[in-house]
Image (cartoon, helix red, strand yellow):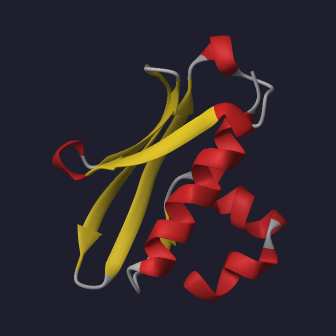
Amino acid sequence: MTAADTVVVDRPERSRFEILVGDEVAGRAFYRLRDGLIVFTHTEVDDRFGGRGIGGALARAALDAARARGLRVRPDCPFIMGWIEKHPEYRELL
């Protein structure tokens, strides 16, 4: 199993993005929405799926969704902030 075997879905009723491996939730990126802004508050990946790029795939999909919706991003979550620092093509969202 790799990140390519995953699907990321937005669960607005739970204020989070989920990354699925099959029908199992492998990770979550929690957020709060404000006027034109998405604040990422916490990201977690289940230990069973660690080291396979799941967190990065989740970050990329969540940020791509924010971009598609025209939202600015505030990464209060250290993981999302670190991921953006390593991927400068996402810095314009800040």
Point out residue 30 in the picture as x, y percentages from the top left corner: 38, 46
Q: Quadrant of residue 51?
A: top right
Whether residue 31 appears in this view of the structure is yes
- Would residue 15 appear left or right of 68 to someone viewing this image? left
The residue lying toward the viewer, choosing from 82 and 53, is 53
Point out residue 78 in the picture as x, y percentages from the top left corner: 61, 52
The residue lying toward the viewer, choosing from 12 and 93, is 12
Answer above or below: position of 24 versus 84.
Answer: above
Answer above or below: position of 59 versus 70.
Answer: above
- Residue positioned most to the top: 48
The residue lying toward the viewer, choosing from 83 and 27, is 27
Point out residue 40 in the picture as x, y percentages from the top left corner: 44, 58
**Residue at 60% from the left image edge and 35% from the top image edge:** 6
**Residue at 58% from the left image edge and 47% from the top image edge:** 58
Point out residue 13 in the picture as x, y percentages from the top left corner: 16, 47
Answer above or below: position of 78 versus 23.
Answer: below
The residue lying toward the viewer, choosing from 18 and 40, is 18
